[in-house]
Amino acid sequence: MTSSPVAPAPVLDSSRLAKLREALLAASFTADGCLDLLGPTAYAALARSEAVPALRATRGGSPLETLVLLFLLQQPVPYAAAAVALPVEDCLADGWLVRDGEQVRATVDVRPYANEVAGLPSADAWVVSDLGCAVGGAGGIGSGETAAGIARRDLVLGVGGASTTLANLTVRRPVREALDLGSGSGVQALHAARHAQRVTATDLNPRALHFTRLTLALSGFENTATAEGSLFEPVGDRRFDLIVSNPPFVISPAGRFTYRDGGMAGDELCRSVVRGAAAHLEPGGYCHLLANWQHVKGEDWQERLAGWVAGTGLDAWVVQREVQDAAQYAELWLRDGGDHRGPGSDYQDRYGEWLDTFEAAGVEGIGFGWITLRASGASDPTVRIEEWPHPVEQPLGPHIESWFARQDFLREHDDAGLLAARFVLADEVVQEQVGAPGAEDPEHVILRHNRGMRRATKVDTVGAGFVGVCDGTLAAGEIVDAIAQLLGEEKVVLRDRVPESLRLLTEQGFIEPAV
């Protein structure tokens, strides 16, 4: 795909960016500062692209209010007010602002971002994106070219729900090399730069790479580099300890937006990222990506995705969070692109084009979810593909790392090894008994985990008894023998039966190997 000629984004000048960053901090133009100013209601409304509550909260004329009006609400402010809050002449010279008579306007959205990484204190950062594209796609831009002469296909989005989800899923640990594949405005690179010695950000859109550099430089990071090109092409045969990707995964009939439409048929782009990750992960490295995949008539979607991973040598955990039918999916992305605001006949034609494409490919639905891959080096990799539409605890990254660690443990222990191991009950696991009111014994017992994936599983009397006493003191086999004696069962028979349950409880995180 080639990019259209576009208007330039602000100039990248490190010394003046440092002055701009100091001004933003001095005015408390940070995530916490904006929340304090606007209050939770107006702040939450901004995340939904609703500006009215924030406009009502910014009538006082303080430097912070001026910055909110300029960069978040895209309102003109008097030159004199901007001069109090910013090094205004530098901002005009570098293209952050433009003159409009006695007023100035912002040329880009600069959004405060609480850059949080597990194990590190929160740090103030800013994400730079095109005006009107901070959240919610290109729907608010209008048709054709933007007011700045930027082709809509080349727009660069800011922080959205998908980017936040991916950031929360990522395993955070000190690493040498990290790769942000399809960086957009640089949100994932911003997180990675806090725990990686070096971050490489790639994108097919040169404007996106420029915005990535603006985001990282304004936020004070120098341990980063960018490379232009498609997927893994710009990095050659380099390997990374961490790969993160919020790729243009939308399955569309025609590539209209570089940020969302990958230009490949169906879900081939996401499959290509999965297949390509194997050649670019260091031993023990993780790859996290968000993805869409087709549910094709006559095919099992789980078997289809298992085929993406087959032969890569990678462990994989695929979680489907939602499924939409073809009509719902078309409507979602037509609205994202603002097509619903155009002439009715144009919208209907585009809608029909989406449905024709899906019908021709036998697509009955589209799955939304996330994929985590790890280069474990195992001769028999673990591949888990599941549907989980239920609420989860964020950030989920620490729980994902624990899940993969438990797969290593289970691979290394046969049934005898499991019975010889010691286990502890995971934090915040509770037991529920279900039965008719007044009944002497419950019909069944449910274990419920209030952390991570927040799973629940039914256990029998043996399972309930086991988790009730596994505190790391006794080996699993010793506990099983004691339960057998209490129940009057043969120890050998129970020892043969229990390992399967131990594997399930360990895999799902209800019990953990004692350290």
Image (cartoon, rainbow, N blue to C red):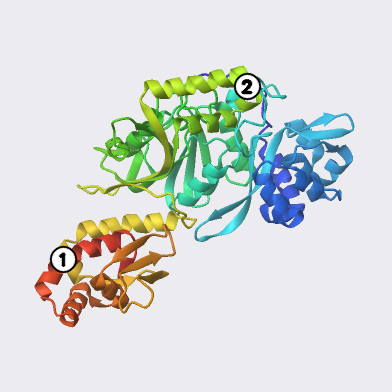
In this rendering, the count of numbered labels is 2
Q: Secondary structure at mark 1?
A: helix
Q: Residue at x 13, y 76 (%)?
A: 489
Is 311 displayed left or right of 266 in the figure?
Answer: left
| Residue 245: quadrant of the picture | top left
Badge number at residue 497? 1
Q: Which of 226/376 is in front?
A: 376
> Residue 34, image x and y in percent?
72, 52
- State the image coordinates of residue 434 (x, y, percent, origin top left): 36, 69
Question: Where residue 335 appears, x then y in whole percent?
Answer: 59, 31
Q: Is 34 situated above or below 451? A: above
Q: What kind of residue is marked 2?
A: Ala
Q: Is residue 315 left or right of residue 198?
A: left
Which residue is painted at 32% across and 67% down in the image? 511
* Residue 242 in sight in this render: no
Q: Which mark is residue 128?
A: none
Per the image, the residue denoted by label 2 is 151
Relative to residue 501, is residue 448 drawn left or right?
right
Residue 189 drawn at (x, y percent): 52, 43
Chain-order first, disc 1 or disc 2: 2
Structural distance between the alpha carbons of marks 1 and 2: 64 Å
Q: Quadrant of the C terminus?
A: bottom left
